[in-house]
Structure formats: C-alpha cells, structure tokens
Amino acid sequence: MADQQVHYSDYLQLNKIINAQFPESDKKELSAHDEMLFIIIHQAYELWFKQLLHEVDSVTAIMEKPSLNDNSPELQTIVHRLSRVVTILKLVVHQIDVMETMTPMDFLDFRDMLRPASGFQSWQFKALEARLGLKFEQRHGQEYYTSQLRKEQVDIIKKAENSKSVVQLLNSWLERMPFFDEPGNWKNFETTFPPADAISFGNEPGVNPFWNEYFQRYQQSLADVERSTNNTFANYFSKDDAVDANQRSLSAKASRAALFIMLYRGYPMLQLPFQVLNVLLEIDEQLSTWRYRHMSMVHRIIGTRIGTGGSTGRDYLKGALDKHYIFGDIARLTSFLIERRKLPYLSKEMEQRLGFVQTDIS
C-alpha cells in the first residue's frame, strides 16, 4: 500500500488551532477588538511551555542515567537542548512587546468578562518551574499557588515536584566529579601555604591539597575588612548544613566541583561541563527577565488592582521575581573566583587528565 500523503493543514491540526479562539466579548455581543490578540498570545505561551517541558524532560532523562560520560555526545545533547530552552524563553519575553500594544483601556473592554480566569492558573508553567528545581518551600504565595487549579492539574504539578529535578540531578552529577578523589592527580601539586587550621574540605588525608591552597589564595584576594570577618568560603565549601535545611540546592562537594569547573574551564575536559553551568544561569536570567517584564506590563495596564483570579497582581509578581531563583547556588559561586594569574598551577598529571592526551602513532 502506498503511504497516505500528509497535508500541511492536517499535519498541524490547523482546523483545531485556528478555530480555538472564542472571545467572551463575542458571546456577549460587546465590542472588544483586542481580546483576540489576548487569547492568541496566551495560547502561544502555553504551546511554548509545552515545548519547554518536552526539552527539560528529555534532559532529565539523560541526567538520570547512573553514569553520564562527560566526554560524550550525551553531554553535548544536554547543552544543546538547554540552549534551546534559553532561546525559547527569549522569544517568550519578546511576546510581551506584542502584548504591550494593547492599552489599559483596550484591556478594560473585556477584562471583567474573564473572571476568575487568570495566568496564575497556568499549570504548565508551574510544572516547568518544578521540573527545573523550584521547591514548594521556595515558592512565593505557597498557600494559594495551586488553589485555583483543577485536581488533575494539581496532580501533574505534584508529580513534577516529586520527580528528580534538573537541580537535583545537577548536584548528583557534580558530586560524581572524580578528579579530587584520585591521589595520582595531586602527587606533584605544589603548595605555597600550609594547610588551613580547623577547616576540612571533605578530603581524605593525603588525597589532594588543592582546596586548602585555593582557600588561602582566596583569602588573600579579599579586602582587609572582608578578610577579618569572612568565613563564608569555609562554610560554603565544607559544610552541608544549609543543604539539609533546604537553604541550598548544591552540596558542599557539588559546589567545590562547580567552582573548579568555572576556574579551569579552559581545559578541554571541562568545557562542556562549564557550558552546562552557564546555560542554567542563562535560564534563570531569562525566567527572571520574563517575570520582570510581566510585572511591569501588569503594573502599566491595571496599576495596583488585584488580578482577575484574585491574586495581588503586581505585588505577587514582584514577590515571585525576588524569590524564584532556581540556580542561585551556581550564580553565588562567582563570589569565590580569583584572578587567573593567581590560580594554583595544576600538576602535570592533572593537566593531562583534563586535556587531550597526545599519543605516538608512528
């Protein structure tokens, strides 16, 4: 049998999509020209949220594997798909430019007809935040963030919250970084400072002296007033108390690995891992930009009025903007960087481990 030919309209289900706009103002025979724009923009948002979930789910499926080869196509796939997430989020932000062609009076033509519908009921966006790693405890407005959703939508969000998130999988991946647990990488590592007193960076005695050396160099890079009061480095990279208390998402061991990747990202073995960290920061930046633009647009169009769904409108969006940083632990690592010229020199064994090993094939 010959394969049935695929038609453009059928393949894209255009009859369903193009005929899926039913303005409330038309039902009431009232004039509200901009309601069509309002519907189409939000439908486009939800389609993009679906694609974002598709990309993030594929990334977590790769990262959930017991062993992820850092020098494999799989890691490149993770970077590629997370980069696509960034590009889509940029497009989502720019859609607000189209929304802002609607004036406050244009919106008032149909706003009251929408109650109690609200963007606050976008379960896909909440599920996306959860899949990336936003915990319930970190949410602004915990008491009502699922109160207006249907049961099946709440179930989807709860499932997302109970699944391994990108942040959790990132933490496990970073903790598996092997370089510090291999004594051979550090046997010729040269130190210029004695070991720091009363500070343990999770190293077995004699395994590697890198972090004590780096800690001393970091302390030297601080201003006098910082050096006399600063114990953040030791707390951040040697203690997991804050992780246990849900104040941090990356353990001390994972944070050490991530900082090392940032410091020595020029080595071939660390280039893809650095891109993973960097693209996650870009995702947080675009989500933050989207929240800020959304908040500003709401303030411009409805001022300080409450949302159609009963939320506090601009004030709720401001609270989410200030609180909903998913990859903040990665961003905070930049506080612990020092100048390249002051970095400890790695041993030849470690440089070979991180670089491309040349072999004689003659």
Image (cartoon, rainbow, N blue to C red):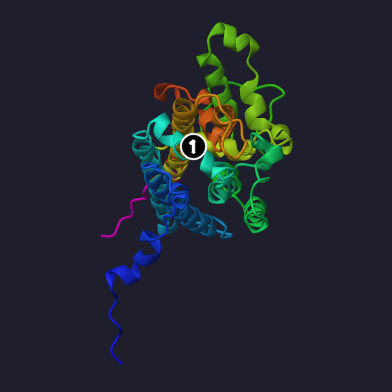
Amino acid type of the residue tagged 1 in the rendering: Asp
- The quarter holding residue 107 reads top left
- Considering the image in quadrants, where does the N terminus appear? bottom left
Residue identified by numbered label 1: 284
Classify 351 as above or below 219: below
Q: Is 249 within the magenta?
A: no
- The single residue placed furthest to the front in the displayed view is 29
Nearest the viewer among 162 and 99 is 99
The reply to whether residue 186 is in sight is no
In the picture shown, does residue 164 fall above or below 245?
Answer: below
The residue at the far bottom in this view is 1
Q: Residue at x 57, y 50 (%)?
A: 123
x and y percentages locating residue 52 in the rendered image? 46, 51
**Residue 180 x %, y %:** 57, 41
Give x and y (percent) for residue 162. 67, 53
Task: Note whether residue 224 is visible.
Answer: yes
Image quadrant in which you'd find residue 340:
top left
Q: Residue at x 50, y 24 (%)?
A: 303
Most prominent secondary structure in the magenta stretch? loop
For the point 33% across and 51% down, the residue is 358
Find residue 312 and report its horizontal and vertical position in percent: 61, 30
